Image (cartoon, rainbow, N blue to C red):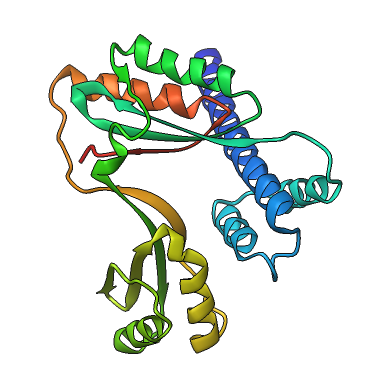
């Protein structure tokens, strides 16, 4: 019983730590977006989007409210966006997006993840040109042609639209995110998005072999453990 209890206790601790990291990342993102664009989700679509994502990831309401209340105060941390690129295990390509109040610390932390896995951090633009920076909107209950017509009539630069079992997925340049969501809202009313994100999508993927698979998993875990890291994108299949 002792060992089984300890294993269960360790597992619960890991789950708790993982949840705390998720809550922290969302809290930081909500705070930054609310502080820069306004605390009212009705007038700040980016804030509304991140709140919806947080709720889908089961972030408690008090975490969301605390971040918004903090932004209302005006004072507090001044976070900035930091993006790092490089080549991970098996020469895969990696983009790491961070929110940081200390760019030097964050750079050193991210670089250490590369160093410890014997991989190489690159310069800005070293791999991002091999990714498409897209807004991705996925929702159900609407006609594909009507959605596409509405977006094109509003001069939204649609990259692609997919229809899979009644779920539509719209891909557009990341700069078109606000315009696309505003057009859809005006044309079809309030939409419950299954996915509402801006991501880097690799133009080509690569497969890892042998020990590179384990090293890649370790590399990802190390990055995810950093408080400043918000998202990690890669081209591993």
Residue 67 vertical position relative to residue 158 in the rendered view, above or below = above
Q: Residue at x 20, y 21 (%)?
A: 212
Q: In front: 1, or 31?
A: 31
Number of numbered markers: 0
Left or right, 204 with respect to 112, comes to left
Left or right, 93 with respect to 231, comes to left
Left or right, 195 with respect to 70, comes to left
* Residue 95: % across, % down: 37, 35
Q: Residue at x 82, y 50 (%)?
A: 69
Q: Is residue 192 visible?
A: no
* Residue 161: % across, % down: 28, 72
Picture quadrant where residue 14 is located: top right
Q: Is residue 163 visible?
A: yes
Q: Residue at x 55, y 17 (%)?
A: 6
Q: Residue furthest right?
A: 73
Quadrant of the image for the C terminus?
top left
* Residue 178: % across, % down: 52, 67
Q: Residue at x 30, y 17 (%)?
A: 120
Residue 149 vertical position relative to residue 82 in the rendered view, above or below = below
* Residue 59: % across, % down: 63, 49
Left or right, 44 with respect to 108, comes to right
Q: In front: 45, or 54?
A: 45
């Amino acid at each position: 019983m002792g060992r089984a209890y300890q294993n269960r206790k360790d597992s619960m601790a890991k789950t708790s730590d993982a949840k705390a990291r998720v809550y922290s990342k969302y809290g930081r993102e909500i705070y930054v977006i609310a502080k820069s664009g306004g605390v009212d989700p009705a007038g700040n679509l980016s804030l509304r989007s991140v709140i919806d994502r947080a709720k889908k990831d089961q972030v408690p309401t008090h975490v969301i409210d605390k971040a918004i209340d903090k932004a209302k105060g005006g004072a507090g941390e001044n976070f900035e966006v930091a993006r790092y690129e490089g080549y991970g295990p098996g020469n895969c390509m990696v983009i790491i997006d961070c929110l940081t109040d200390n760019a030097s610390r964050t750079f050193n932390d991210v670089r250490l993840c590369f160093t410890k896995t014997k991989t190489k951090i690159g310069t800005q633009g070293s791999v991002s040109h091999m990714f498409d920076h897209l807004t991705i909107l996925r929702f159900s209950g609407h006609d594909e042609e009507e959605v596409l017509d509405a977006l094109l009539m509003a001069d939204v630069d649609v990259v692609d639209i997919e229809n899979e079992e009644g779920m539509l997925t719209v891909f557009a340049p990341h700069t078109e995110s606000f315009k696309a969501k505003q057009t859809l809202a005006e044309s079809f009313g309030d939409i419950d998005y299954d996915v509402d994100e801006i991501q880097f999508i690799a133009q080509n993927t690569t497969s890892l072999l042998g020990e590179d698979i384990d090293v890649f998993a370790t590399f990802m875990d190390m990055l995810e453990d950093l408080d400043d890291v918000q998202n990690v994108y890669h081209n591993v299949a």
